Each structure stands twice: as C-alpha cells, then as structure tokens.
C-alpha cells in the first residue's frame, strides 16, 4: 500500500485474537464481583450499558455496587466510611473511619470465577480465548512524564499537570479524591450514579459531587488519543461499512459508539499494537499446552509463544508524538496539525517520521519490575455451548508463581464454574530514578485496582491468526485484502445473512433449494467482557496487628503468618459470590456460595475469609432471600422492615457435616441456665470451640476468629453501634414479641440474621491451621435447605481425598448421624398456609395451635384447596416490596400495594368512562332538542320534498370501467398473482391518478379484481 497510514497485518503489528462467530455469547465474572457495567441501580436490568465499557452482555447480568445505600457521607470512593461517636457520659466526640473495600494480600491466591455462554476449552464447536488483565492507579492516571503520549495540559514543561497526575483531585489534600479507577459514588440514597461520563477534562477530575458520580477506568487522555489516531486499516472488516476514520471504528463497532473512555480498537483486538494501561495476567487458549507457559518456559505452544512475545508487560508498543527531548517542542504542534484535527493521527513509524514527528516505543517493564511469572499462557477450561454453567473439572488452571507447592493441588475445582487461580502480584518495584517521578507512592497506587476479563470466540470458517501464532502450513489469515469493496462484493469469505444453495430442486420447474444463514458480519468476530469493581492490593503486614472494634478489623498474628509462608504455605482467599434472590431471579448471576468452596490445605497454609455484597439489589423475600437490614435503614427501628429487603450479608458457622443444616455446638452449656455466671459461659464456650476449630492451637485468638466469623462482631463494632445509637441486638423474646414475620426477620437489630451489620463488606481475617481433618462450614443466614445452600469445606492434612469420579472434595455424608441436634430455641411460628398473609407456594408454614389447657386444636379441612402462587418479579423492575406477594386476579385475596394500585386504576377508568358517557348523552340530547325545535318552526323543507318526489328517479346502470367519472387508483392482484398498475379509466394504464376531492376518504378499487376483493 502506498498509503503509509495503513498498517498491514504482519508480524507484531497485525494481531487478531478473535474473528468471532455470531452468537449471544455473554460472559459474567462472579468472583471478584463483575459489574457488567452496573453501578448502584436497584433494578433487575442495568440502567446503562455504555457507562464504563462495552460488555456486549445481557442487561440482566452483573452485580450491584459493593456498598451500603447512600452518598459520600455513607461511603466515599476509596471505600472509607466515616463515623462520629459521642460519649454519653462526657459528651466528647470521636471521629473514626472503617474501610469497606475488598482487598487482597499480595502473593495470596484469588479464584477468578466466570461463566461463558458459548463454550470453550477444546470444544470442537468453537475456539476461544480468555484474556485476564488488571490495572491500578499508576497506569490509569499516571504521574510520569514523557512516557505516555503528550496531551493537552500534561505535556511539555509549563503545562498544568506536568509532574502531576492529570485527574486525581488534589485541590483538597485531606480528600485527594481518586480519579481512576473509580466506580462512581451516588449523591444520595435515591441516586444510582449510572450516567456515562462526559467526554471532557472537567468531568474526569472528581472535584465535585457531580463529577464523582461518574465512574472512570481508562481516562480522558487515553480516549482522546483513541479518537484522534487513525484506525488500523489493515484489519479484516468483512462487508461492514466502518463509519469512523479513527480507532473508535471497528468491525464490531462500526459507528464507534462510546462506552466510558474505553478504546474500541483496543477492546476488540488482543494483543493490541499500541500502548495500553492494562497489565496482562493470563491468556487461556484452546491452543495452550498441558502445562502452563511463562516467559522463561523453554517449550510452549506456538500460540503461547506468540503471546509471550507480544504482551506489553515486556514487549514494546509504539506511538507517534512530538519530540519530548526538544525544549522547543509543544503539544500544540500535534494538536493543531491537520492529521490530528481530521482524526487521522499517525499510527505507524513510517508515516509518523515522514511527517516530521518521533516514533516512541514503550513497555510496562520500562518502569516496573515484573516477574517472569506475572503473565501466564495456559489451556482453557472445557465448557459446553449454550449454557452459563460449570466447566470440566480436570482443566482448572493455576498460576503457581514458581512455588514448591502448586495451587492446583490446593483449590479443588470439582463441579464449578470456570476458574483461574490468580496469584495476586506483589506491588511492583519502580525502575525509574527517582521512583517518585513514576508515581509518588506505589502502595497508594495499588489501593485502587480493577480486574478485566475478555471472552473471545472464533469459528473455523476462515483463518484469523498470523503465521507466528499457528503451525506451519496453515492458511493465510484474512485481512484488509479480504474486505468487500462494494455492496455484494464476494471478496469477503462471508457476507451479511447469505443464501447458500444446497440442491437443484425436486424437479426442473420448482427452482433450486437454498437456505438463509444468520450471519451478522459485525458480530462474526465478537468479544465479550466483564470487569470487577475497584479493589485494593495490599502488602503483607510487617508486624502483629491487634484487633480493633473501632475500625472493625481483625487481628493478624505476624509471627505465625511469616513462619507459615517460610515453610511454603500460601494465603487462600475465601470470598462469597452471588446475590440476593432465588436461582431464577438472580440469573445470569448466581445464588450465594463460597468461592472457593473446597480447599485441601496443609498446616502451613492460611485462609483469608472476606466478602462483600450490595444493598442495592432488587427487593427479595418470601423464602427467596433472608434477613435485612431494610431499605431505607434506620439502624434501630422497625421502619421499613415490613418490606422485602435488598441487602447481601453472609457469615461462617462451622457444622459437623456438609449434609447438616445446623451449626456445631458452640456453647458447651445449656443457654436456658440463667444461674451460670458469664465467666463460666465464656470459658465453656471457649473450650467447646477449641475442641473442633481448625485453628485450635492458637487458643483465644482462634476463639475470637471463629466467633467473629459467626456473628460478624455485631455487638462490638463501633461503626454499627454509632449508627444505631448504642441500641443492643434484639433478644429472642423481643423478636418473638414483634408478631410479624417480615418485620422480625428484616429488623435492623435482628443480629440473628446479621442485620445489625450496616455494610455488606466484612473482613474475617486470617485463619491458620493447627489441626487436621475436615472442617465443613456454612452461612446460617443464607443457607436454606431445598431453596439454596451456602456450604464450604476445608480439609487440612494428608487425609484429604478428592472423589476420582467427580473431582469433588467433600466429607462423608452420614445420611443419619444419630447425633443430638445442637441446643436451640423455638422461635415464633407464623401460619401462612391459608394465604391470608400472602402466597403459599414458597415454603408456607402451618403452626401447631394449643388452647389454654395445652391441648392441640385441630380442625380438619373438608373443602378442596389450591396453592396460591407468588408474583415473582424476576425479569424487570426492582422487586416486590411485600413478602410473598400473590399472583392472582382475585383482588379479595390480595393484600398489597399492588391491590391498591389496581383498584385505583380500575376506579379511575370507571370514572373516566362514566364522565365521557354523561358528556356524550348530554350532547346527543341537546342536538336532538335543538333539531326538533327547528323543524317545528320551519316547514319549508316539506315543499321541497314534494317537488323531489314528483320527479322520476334515474335507474342505476351496470357498472363498467368505462363509466366516466369513476377513477381507480388502488393496486390489485391479477389472477396470476402479479401486481397490476393503478389506472384511471379513459386515461390509459399506468397513468397517475388522484382521488376526487369529494371522495378522498373512499377506497378506490379495480372492477376487474372485484371478484377477488
């Protein structure tokens, strides 16, 4: 090509990861929580699919923002919740904060879990690639100068943001609001903060509550370069008309629609040929080998070698700019050029240097020390097509970081969704001298990170890989030479919705046989995506950390942790996936479960229990979800507790067997024995817990960890106590006295349901292991047998065995253990089988009733009864406000807001109809009365009638097309099925006709076709 702005797809510059077949192949990340471009909407469906990135997924997917309801005063962008406590005795106030953002220790293991719709992992129906990347503040809002391309206000010496981050709000050092990555913070409890950020510098700087509403991951500068730089015209675009000259226009996005500040060309192609802020974690490919491939691995597959040679982690990517080393250079030279203004800035070295500019090449390793195991290529999990479900257990991939113990041996895949065990990176060491030129504080930078997952699927209809990525003898890949130049150009391998002939026909008279294919060439090559909310990566503690009720943080035993790590142990994160609702309501997300839910560990390993959720889910109740707190949350009253709640909460309680649905005995004494002193209760409980807990050797520290996990520190959490003004958890007697099941279960002081925890985030801390054996656990709040199970198991020691037939780690099911049920109390029973309190199809109860003498009152039913179905609002809206709302047309059986609304509309309709009918009858009466009056006073018309009757009437002749004055203008079908032309008799066939003015409302017709009309 003589046009040097076109980059021909060769060697490093032309890389298509996926020319992907047309399917609705959504991908959803479940751990960490994938947003699917949501934020804080309470709806079943997301508000805005253009907010941060182009997911290409269904609107129903994704998890709501990980926060309690409210604006910055509740929780700011950094995840900090602020409190002011007042001592009632002295009147002194104390201000403190608690962190409510999920974090991972560097070097710990995080299970990245997702479901993909159209298969993967060597499935012969499709080929696929999974691309995992992360980015933190240092690359998403960089401080370094003369590394990334110059942009307005961050360029040569003297520009506003030289030597600074361009977007972090430093106007208030105390706040120093982070710009990127940021999720976006609602202004108040009624705001969802789901608007797409404006395409301007002012919106990117979070210096007002309005701009802090906007989420931002890639930044405004990055998108500006994307929209000004010429797109790669060497790419295969099939028969699509790409309507942008710049990098916003791709085959999959021909109009260049904006999704936050994501660059469409970078999104659709990997590895990309230009600089990107994303650091590669892994590529999982069908063309991967049996073993994982790292940079230093001597024998990898061709595809994995190709990725290693093209990741920006170590390999340089180029861009065109003014000369950074010339003191006379200014960014205006670029931004005032015709190439920049016409969205045709140079995308290759030759064109750049010919125009008198400088071609720069950079990699992340230029500034950061990235280990050889920071990026891995491996084989994908096998998954069947047309499902959002589990993957084959034998193909779980792990990033082992070169340790002596493999992650694969510890995290049991079993029957679970697709997983990749991510070894969280250590915060990189900066190579740049001085380091502060790159970023002021890398620990601060890694406090805000996001994870990105892309799912690319390919067909075998044509070749989509350069020669460096495939075996010898493979056909040449498609590129711009295969694009259609005109409509119906057969140059492209596939065209839009083509016809394919499959036979000559049954005989010569009926025509050939052909089929129509569903091929959308802008999707016949498709990338799907999901991203996490912002999380933190923290360095390991360097000393003991005491537990703090004020900050609601657990203790850290540094000596034990350091000793375990030195012995080869690892830290495994146990999180909670899923959201509030039943399996249909949450789909394509999932119900609650622990992830991973099966661990086989050594005594040197540790588990970090930690999870988050959201208080912005659709309202769910009626056995579809458990507990509160309510929305809105008053923290210490029953206000709003009669409505279904939205909140996610979880806890961890150990039990005897995974088949049980009750906890182990945590007490060691009879809780009804009021004579037992508190000190004795504490001692007996401590002893009882240490008899079964896996951390028993740690004594009181173990006891504190186990009870913290079970009760979430609700009685001592200073933040919770401040919000509820010191109110205590409700007692059993107080809960039973409420007299309304919904109110009792959603009451914000019902600690039995974890409702007194005002935020969905909880840090359970590190657990070390001193005992071997199986340790099953569950969430007492969410586990609801036959509705949903939230159960996990940790096995410690050499006795852990995985079932060879299923790949599952589990303890022995005792079927009937014979063990005595743990000490419990009977709560108030609410009879719901009669339907008076709502639907009866979902776990309705029938309570035993006794009289004053203690005798059971039972009256057998003698009539036929029917189950009353629940009005599940699964597909739209924000959920039913009342528990067990009835699906019924019988208004007498409905006792909800819906009944009142329905009655209001019915009565309104009746009223409007009655008003219209009265108006209509009145007008008819008035017209009739006036007419009668006129005719009674005016008799002239009678003489006129007599004159008319005295004349003979004309006889209608036979209708003919030659009758003058009759004009036919309607198209009609002839007997052979063809469409005849409109015509006017006497004017000739095909003559333009117009209906006579007096007959404009009449239909014209053809006399010859009258038999067919």
Image (tube, rainbow, N blue to C red):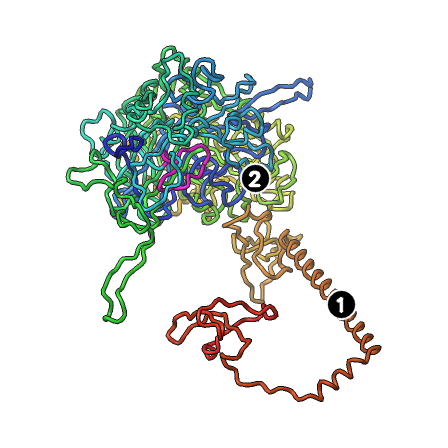
Q: How many marks?
A: 2
Badge 2: few (under 14), some or many (20 or more) residues near its Cα, within 10 Å?
A: many
Taking the spot 36% from the left edge, 19% from the top edge, the residue there is 428
The quarter holding residue 1009 reads bottom left
Which quarter of the picture shows residue 594? Answer: top left
Estimate the x, y position of residue 924 in percent, counting from the top left: 75, 70
Per the model, the C-alpha gap separating discs 2 and 1 is 58 Å
Q: Quadrant of the N terminus?
A: top left
Above/below status of 43 relative to 973: above
Closer to the observer: label 2 or label 1?
Answer: 1
Q: State whether residue 794 appears in this view.
A: no
Q: Position of residue 704 (x, y in %)?
A: 48, 26
Horizontally, residue 560 falls left or right of residue 858, namely: left
Tell me the chief SS of the magenta region.
loop
Badge 1: residue crowd in 10 Å (few <14, some 14–19, many ≥20): few
Disc 2 vs disc 1: Cβ atoms closer than 8 Å? Answer: no
**Residue 551 in picture, x, y percent from top left:** 53, 22
Q: Earlier in the sequence, mark 2 or mark 1?
A: 2
The stretch of residues the image draws in magenta is 249-267
Estimate the x, y position of residue 109 in percent, counting from the top left: 36, 29
Q: Residue at x 62, y 40 (%)?
A: 735
Secondary structure beneath label 1? helix
465 is higher (above) or lower (below) than 921: above
Kindly identify which residue carries mark 1.
923
């Amino acid at each position: 090509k003589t046009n040097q702005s076109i980059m021909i797809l060769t060697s490093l510059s032309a890389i298509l990861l996926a020319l992907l077949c047309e399917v609705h192949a959504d991908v959803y990340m479940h751990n960490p929580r994938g947003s699917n471009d949501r934020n804080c909407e309470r709806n079943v469906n997301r508000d805005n699919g253009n907010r941060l990135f182009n997911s290409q997924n269904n609107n129903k997917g994704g998890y709501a923002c990980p926060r309690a309801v409210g604006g910055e005063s509740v929780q700011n962008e950094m995840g900090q919740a602020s409190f002011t406590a007042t001592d009632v005795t002295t009147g002194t106030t104390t201000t403190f904060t608690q962190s409510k953002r999920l974090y991972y220790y560097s070097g710990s293991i995080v299970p990245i879990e997702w479901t993909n719709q159209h298969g993967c992992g060597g499935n012969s129906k499709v080929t696929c690639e999974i691309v995992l990347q992360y980015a933190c503040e240092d690359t998403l809002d960089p401080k370094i100068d003369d590394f990334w391309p110059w942009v307005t206000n961050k360029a040569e010496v003297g520009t506003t943001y030289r030597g600074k981050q361009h977007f972090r709000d430093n106007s208030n050092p105390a706040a120093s609001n982070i710009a990127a990555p940021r999720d976006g913070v609602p202004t108040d409890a009624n705001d969802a903060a789901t608007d797409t950020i404006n395409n301007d510098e002012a919106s990117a700087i979070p210096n007002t509550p309005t701009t802090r509403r906007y989420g931002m991951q890639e930044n405004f500068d990055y998108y500006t370069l994307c929209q000004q730089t010429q797109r790669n015209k060497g790419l295969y675009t099939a028969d699509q008309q790409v309507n942008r000259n710049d990098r916003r226009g791709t085959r999959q996005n021909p109009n260049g629609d904006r999704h936050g500040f994501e660059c469409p060309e970078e999104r659709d192609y990997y590895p990309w040929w230009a600089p990107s802020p994303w650091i590669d974690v892994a590529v999982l490919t069908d063309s991967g080998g049996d073993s994982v491939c790292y940079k230093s691995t001597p024998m990898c597959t061709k595809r994995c070698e190709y990725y290693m040679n093209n990741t920006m982690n170590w390999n340089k990517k180029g861009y065109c700019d003014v000369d950074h080393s010339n003191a006379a250079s200014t960014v205006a030279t670029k931004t005032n050029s015709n190439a920049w203004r016409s969205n045709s800035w140079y995308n290759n070295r030759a064109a750049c240097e010919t125009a008198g500019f400088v071609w720069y090449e950079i990699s992340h390793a230029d500034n950061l020390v990235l280990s050889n195991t920071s990026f891995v290529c491996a084989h994908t999990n096998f998954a069947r097509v047309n499902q959002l479900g589990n993957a084959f257990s034998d193909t779980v991939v792990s990033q082992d970081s070169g340790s002596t113990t493999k992650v694969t041996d510890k995290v049991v895949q079993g029957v679970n969704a697709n997983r990749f065990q991510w070894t969280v990176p250590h915060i990189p060491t900066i190579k740049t001298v001085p380091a502060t030129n790159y970023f002021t504080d890398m620990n601060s930078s890694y406090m805000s990170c996001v994870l990105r997952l892309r799912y690319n699927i390919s067909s075998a209809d044509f070749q989509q890989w350069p020669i460096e990525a495939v075996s010898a003898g493979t056909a040449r890949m498609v590129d711009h030479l295969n694009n259609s130049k005109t409509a119906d150009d057969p140059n492209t391998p596939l065209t839009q919705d083509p016809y394919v002939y499959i036979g000559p026909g049954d005989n010569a008279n009926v025509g050939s046989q052909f089929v129509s294919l569903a091929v959308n060439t802008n999707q016949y090559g498709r990338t799907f995506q999901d991203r996490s909310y912002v999380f933190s990566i923290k360095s390991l503690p360097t000393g003991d950390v005491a537990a703090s009720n004020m900050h609601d943080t657990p203790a850290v035993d540094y000596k034990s942790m350091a000793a375990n790590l030195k012995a080869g142990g690892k830290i495994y994160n146990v999180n909670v996936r899923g959201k509030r609702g039943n399996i249909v309501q949450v789909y394509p997300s999932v119900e609650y479960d622990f992830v991973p839910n099966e661990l086989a560990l050594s005594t040197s390993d540790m588990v970090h229990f930690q999870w988050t959720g959201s208080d912005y889910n659709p309202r769910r109740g009626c056995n579809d979800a458990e507990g509160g707190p309510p929305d809105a949350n008053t923290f210490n009253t029953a206000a709003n507790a009669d409505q279904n709640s939205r909140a996610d909460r979880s806890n961890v309680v150990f039990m005897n067997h995974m088949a049980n649905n009750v906890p182990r005995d945590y007490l060691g004494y009879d809780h009804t024995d009021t004579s037992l002193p508190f000190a004795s209760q504490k001692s007996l409980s401590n002893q009882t817990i240490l008899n079964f807990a896996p951390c028993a050797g740690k004594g009181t520290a173990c006891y504190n960890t186990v009870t913290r996990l079970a009760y979430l520190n609700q009685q001592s959490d200073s933040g919770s106590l401040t919000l509820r003004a010191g109110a205590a958890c409700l007692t059993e007697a107080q809960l039973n006295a409420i007299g309304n099941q919904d109110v009792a279960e959603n009451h914000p002081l019902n600690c039995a349901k974890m409702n007194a925890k005002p935020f969905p985030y909880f840090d359970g801390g590190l657990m070390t292991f001193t005992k071997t054996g199986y340790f099953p656990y569950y969430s007492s709040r969410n586990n609801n047998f036959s509705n949903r199970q939230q159960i996990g198991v940790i096995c410690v020691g050499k006795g852990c065995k995985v079932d060879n037939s299923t790949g599952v780690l589990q303890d022995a099911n005792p079927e009937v253990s014979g063990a005595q049920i743990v000490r419990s109390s009977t709560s108030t029973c609410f009879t719901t089988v009669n339907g008076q309190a709502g639907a009866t199809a979902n776990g309705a109860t029938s309570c035993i009733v006794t009289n004053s003498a203690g005798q059971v009152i039972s009256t057998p039913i003698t009539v036929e009864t029917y189950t009353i179905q629940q009005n599940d609002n699964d597909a739209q809206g924000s959920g039913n406000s009342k528990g067990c709302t009835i699906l019924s047309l019988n208004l007498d059986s409905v006792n909800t807001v819906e009944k009142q609304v329905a009655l209001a509309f019915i009565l309104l309709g009746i009223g409007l109809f009655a008003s219209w009918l009265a108006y209509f009858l009145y007008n008819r009466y008035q017209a009739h009365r006036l007419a009668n009056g006129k005719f009674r006073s005016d008799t002239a018309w009678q003489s006129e009638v007599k004159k008319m009757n005295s004349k003979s009437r004309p006889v209608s002749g036979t209708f003919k097309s030659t009758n003058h004055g009759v004009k036919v203008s309607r198209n009609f079908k002839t007997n052979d099925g063809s469409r005849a032309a409109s015509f006017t008799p006497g004017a000739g066939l095909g003559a333009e006709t117009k209906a006579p003015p007096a007959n404009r409302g009449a239909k014209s017709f053809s006399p010859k076709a009258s038999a067919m009309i």
